[in-house]
Each structure stands twice: as C-alpha cells, then as structure tokens.
C-alpha cells in the first residue's frame, strides 16, 4: 500500500517536471512565458468576460461567425437549416464552445438582411458604371414548371472583367419577343441600370429573345452568342438533319459514332465487360487497379460530350481491341473506321478548344471572335486527311462550308470589327476585307469624336476667344519692338490658325486612331484592359471607347450558368423555397468573398 502511494507521488512529480519540457518543444527550447514571468500579457478578468460575451447572440464574434456560416451555406448550396443539424452543432461545441449556432429562422433573416445590403451596393455600383454588357436567356424550373428570364451583367473593374448574376424575372405569359422586350427594361429599372449605358446584350439564337433585344435596345446592341453558333456546326456534322428522311449531313459519320456508342453503353451496363476492360489495363498495360480508365458516355444534346466520348474511346482503343476479343457479340471498329475517327477528331479538336476558351467569363471575348474564326478555318484546313478516306474528307469539307456560311460575314459586323481593332493583341491582322476595316475605322473615329465633344466643357465661342487671346499674346511676343501697323494682321492670322485646328476635331480623332494602329501588337497572353490602362494618357478618348467595346461578351454562357446554378439550388429538397428567397440565394451564391466582406451583417437577431 505504501509502495503504491510512493509510486503515485513520484509519477505526479514526474508529470510536473515533464509537461513544461514538452511545451518547450514548440518554443525553440525556451520556456513559455507565464503570468509571473514579467514579460507576458495575461488577459484581465474584464477582457475575458468581454470576449465571452461577444460570442453571445448580438455580440461581435457571434455576428462574424454567423456571417461566415451564411457565406458557406450560400456558396456550398447548403440548406439554411444546416446549423440546426446535430453534426454541425457537435462540431461547433468543440471548435467554439462559447458560441451557440443560430437557428434556421435566424439564418433566414440573416440571408434577407445580407441580400438587402449587397443588392443596394450592386445597384449603387450599376449607377456609377460608364458601360455594362448584359446576357439574357429563358429557363423553366423543372419542379414547378415556372419560367424565368435570367440576366447577368458584365463590366470592367480596373483591369478585370467582373460578372454579376444579378437577377431573374418571372414570366407568366407566352414567351413572345414583344412580351420579353417589356421585361428587359423592367429588369434594368429594378437594378438601376441606365439603358443608354448598355453597350450590348448577348443572347443565343432563339428568335424571340433576339426580337426582344432589338425592340428594347435597338438592333445595333444585339450580339449573337458565338459559342452557340459555333456549336451548331459540329452538332450538325455529327448528327442527322431535322427532316423526316433523317439523311445524315455527312454520310458514314453517324454509323461510326453508333458503333462507338454501343461499346460505351455496354461498358456501363455489363459488369463482365467492364471487369474485362479493367483486367486488360492491369495485366497488359501495367495500370494501377485504382487508376484504370473508363469509357465516357455522351449526352445527346451536347456535342462536347460526344467529343469527349470519342476522345476517350481512341485513348483506349488498344485496350478495347483486347477486351472485345472475348465478347463475340461486340462489334469493334475496323481499321478504316478507326482511321476516319482519328481524322474526325483532328477536325473537332480546334472547335472544342475555341468553345472552351470563349466560355470564360473573365476574359474580354468580343475582340477574339474574328481572330478565332480565321484561326479555326486555318486549323481545320491544315488537318491531314487521307484522300482515300471519303468519310473524313466529307466531314472536313462540311465543317469548312458551315464556317463560311455562319461566320463569313463576321467582319461586316461593325461593332465586332471595331472591338477587334481596339484589341491591342489583334488590331487589323486577321481582316480579309479592306472595306470592313474602313467601316470599322470610321465607326471608331465617330466614337472618338463623341468623346472629344463630351470632354469639351466650354462653348465654341469661349474657345475661340481663348484662341484669339493666345494668338494676340504670340503677336505681342513676335512683334515686340516692331511697328504696330506691320504686325497688325498677325494676331488675326494666328487666331484663324488656332480656330481651324480646334475645329478639326475629325482630323484629331483620325490622328489618334492612326497613332494607336502604328503600335506593335502585344502578345496574345496579355490582358487587353491592362494594356489600355497604360495607354490611357496617350489616347484618352480611344481609351474610353476601347473599354466599352472590350466589355462586350461574345457568348451567352454566363446566363446559362446562371440557370445551372438555379437548378442546383431548386433541387428536390428545396421545392418549398419561395420565389423571394430563391432570388436571394441565386444572387448571394454568385457574390465574391471580397465583396461579401464589404457588407458585414449587422446584428439581426
């Protein structure tokens, strides 16, 4: 008994000695400071109580944590009742014991308050913008079959393009162009967007939305979605015509794709076939069993998914040749069909790359359209195709013909051509038509003149009198000590020269544009908005014109992503979400963290 007591006492002393030594490991061998060391800062009792009270409802830390929790719920698409869950409450009790997580009702009020604050900030920002580009599209929610018109705004902030998924308008009538044309101004009014500052509205090829934009903003403001138009070309080449005869646009191509599709489908429905594909990769190609590749199935309405399916099929063709040998029912592609498929993929690859690039929201995409079309045509033309391969040869020619048919008049679009010219990466390099260049230059000179007129804050008479005064001063300087009658007409002649120069605003606009076009083209990797910031003082009026034109989006992909986000929010578990809260969640999900932090929630208990 006494021995046990001595052992316990010894262990206690050992702990008293060892624990400080363990603590020294993380302090470089130095003992940590304590309240008695003289150099430490120990929190006072009042400070401890104040910090503890800040975690209570209405406290500073409570508001900070609640705001961060709301951001997580909005960004990760979590339900507002997430904080009521047992798992999160257990985590919070361990991570922040002094904090009591808010209820669903509290988070709902916090969401409403946050939306009010941020929406006001966005509206104020929209009022101050000098230019804005809109994208618009219609969408029907699958659970309620309610239709909406979604609109996103895009504008330059310093040297970056900023998107804002700012709203959607409920549609309760037939989606005619006339009806939609009334909804667009309604949207602009709600978000304090001046219609005169709308540089362009980018939409897909639906006739109703195109008519709506023409009616509401004018035909010059309409921009057809480049990505949507481009996607129609491979979709038509890979599939069938829409007529009753269902004749292939390119005979032979649907048959090859059908064979590939059958093999891919079998790999997703037959365990034996899927296991054989994995076994072949492991045994014959030394693949890690956990890193084997699978065939990708496509979606009928998305040609990009068909491209990925065919690409993966070609990557695994050697594996499939071995795997299908054990399944006599599977019809593998023969050598000629595989050769045709490789050529087809060579033609599709640059189109797929262009679609991916033009889907970016942060790049100034309107200036890329004319260069991309020229580069696409050149890339497709350079694809090597065996003259004996009739399928691949017809496929390539069909793609080239469709490009000419759909994009052959792109240079004649003055706004698009002007956007390319003010793009310091391209200027006039890719133009084929001198007439198109001339029209675009004239358009830019007119816009520069408008900016010069706006910069002129004084009437012409005042400017003339100032010119006369300057000329008179010059006459006095030149004619100092000379007979006054000899130099009496000099002031009048000098004033007429100054006046003529001041009135030649068109000439100055032309000079400014020509001076810009004499500059060297910058690398394609450079940010055009950043380049123009450096040129701002040299070409002040052209700078403002370029900022407007480079702001225009060439694709309506952002509005499509807007509705993709809406579909994620309105899932099977959120069908009871009210339209008001639905709009708030869509908006808050798109807010960047930096903007979110600018609008910290106030106490909203």
Image (cartoon, helix red, strand yellow):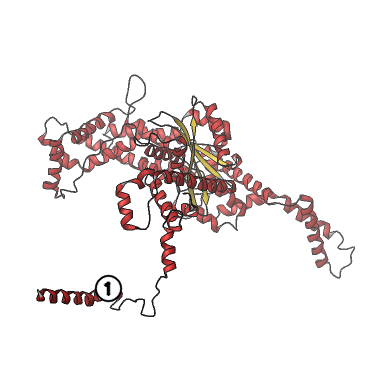
Tell me: 282 left or right of 497.
Answer: left
Tell me: 341 left or right of 225.
Answer: left
Q: Residue at x 36, y 30 (%)?
A: 236
Q: Is residue 550 visible?
A: no
Q: Residue at x 11, y 33 (%)?
A: 327
Q: Residue at x 50, y 56 (%)?
A: 530
Considering every residue shown, the one lying at the far front of the view is: 1
Q: Is residue 278 visible?
A: yes
Identify the image quadrant of residue 491.
bottom right
| Nearer to me, 121 or 485 | 121
Q: Position of residue 232 (x, y in %)?
A: 39, 33
Q: Residue at x 37, y 43 (%)?
A: 81
Q: Position of residue 396 (x, y in %)?
A: 34, 35
| Nearer to me, 415 or 26 | 26
**Regarding mark 1 in the picture, which secondary structure is present there?**
helix
User: Mark 1 highlights which residue?
Assistant: 23
- Work out whether 11 lies above or below 499: below
Packing grade of label 1 (10 A; few <14, some 14-19, many >=20) is some
Quarter of the N terminus within the rendering: bottom left
Tell me: 547 left or right of 15.
Answer: right
- Work out whether 281 lies above or below 99: above
């Amino acid at each position: 008994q006494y021995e046990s007591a001595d052992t316990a006492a010894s262990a206690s002393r050992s702990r008293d000695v060892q624990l400080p030594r363990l603590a020294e490991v993380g302090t470089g061998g130095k003992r940590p400071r304590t309240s008695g060391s003289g150099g430490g800062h120990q929190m006072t009792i009042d400070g401890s109580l104040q910090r503890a009270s800040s975690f209570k409802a209405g406290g500073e830390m409570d508001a900070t944590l609640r705001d961060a929790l709301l951001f997580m719920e909005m960004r990760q698409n979590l339900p507002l009742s997430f904080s009521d869950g047992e798992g999160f409450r257990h985590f919070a009790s361990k991570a922040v014991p002094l904090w009591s997580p808010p209820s669903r009702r509290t988070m709902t009020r916090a969401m409403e308050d946050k939306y009010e604050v941020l929406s006001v900030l966005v509206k104020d920002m929209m009022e101050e913008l000098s230019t804005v580009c809109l994208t618009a599209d219609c969408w029907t929610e699958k659970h309620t079959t309610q239709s909406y018109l979604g609109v996103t705004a895009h504008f330059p902030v310093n040297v970056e393009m900023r998107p804002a998924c700012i709203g959607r308008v409920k549609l309760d009538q037939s989606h005619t162009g006339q009806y939609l044309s009334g909804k667009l101004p309604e949207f602009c009014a709600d978000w304090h967007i001046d219609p005169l500052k709308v540089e362009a509205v980018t939409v897909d090829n639906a006739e109703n939305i195109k008519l709506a934009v023409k009616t509401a903003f004018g035909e010059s403001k309409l921009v057809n979605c480049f990505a949507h138009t481009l996607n129609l070309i491979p979709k038509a080449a890979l599939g069938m015509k829409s007529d009753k005869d269902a004749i292939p646009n390119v005979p032979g191509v649907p048959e090859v794709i059908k064979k590939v599709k059958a093999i891919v489908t079998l790999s997703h429905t037959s365990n034996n076939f899927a296991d054989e594909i994995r076994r072949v990769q492991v045994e014959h190609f030394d693949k890690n069993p956990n890193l084997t590749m699978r065939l990708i199935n496509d979606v009928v309405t998305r040609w990009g998914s068909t491209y990925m399916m065919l690409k993966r099929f070609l990557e695994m063709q050697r594996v499939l040749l071995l795997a299908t040998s054990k399944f006599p029912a599977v019809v593998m592609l023969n050598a000629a069909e595989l050769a045709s498929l490789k050529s087809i993929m060579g033609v599709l690859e640059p189109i797929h790359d262009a679609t991916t690039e033009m889907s970016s929201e942060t790049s100034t995409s309107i200036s890329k359209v004319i260069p991309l079309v020229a580069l696409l045509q050149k890339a497709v033309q350079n694809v090597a195709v065996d003259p004996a391969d009739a399928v691949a040869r017809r496929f390539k020619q069909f793609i080239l013909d469709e490009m000419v048919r759909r994009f052959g008049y792109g240079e004649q679009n003055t706004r698009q051509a002007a956007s390319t010219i003010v793009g310091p990466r391209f200027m006039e390099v890719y133009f084929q038509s001198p007439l198109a260049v001339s029209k675009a230059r004239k358009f830019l000179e007119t816009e520069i003149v408008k900016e010069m007129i706006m910069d002129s804050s004084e009437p012409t008479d005042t400017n003339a009198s100032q010119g006369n005064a300057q000329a008179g001063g010059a006459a006095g300087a030149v004619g100092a000590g000379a007979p006054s009658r000899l130099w009496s007409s000099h002031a009048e002649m000098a004033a007429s020269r100054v006046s003529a120069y001041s009135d030649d605003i068109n000439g100055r606009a032309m000079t400014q544009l020509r001076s810009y076009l004499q500059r060297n083209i910058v690398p394609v990797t450079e940010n055009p908005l950043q380049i123009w910031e450096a040129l701002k003082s040299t070409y002040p009026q052209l700078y403002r014109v370029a900022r407007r034109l480079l702001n225009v989006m060439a694709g309506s992909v952002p509005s499509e992503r807007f509705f993709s986000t809406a579909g994620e929010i309105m899932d099977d578990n959120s069908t009871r979400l009210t339209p008001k809260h639905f709009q708030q969640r869509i908006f808050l999900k798109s807010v960047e963290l930096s903007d979110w932090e600018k609008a910290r929630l106030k106490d909203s208990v």
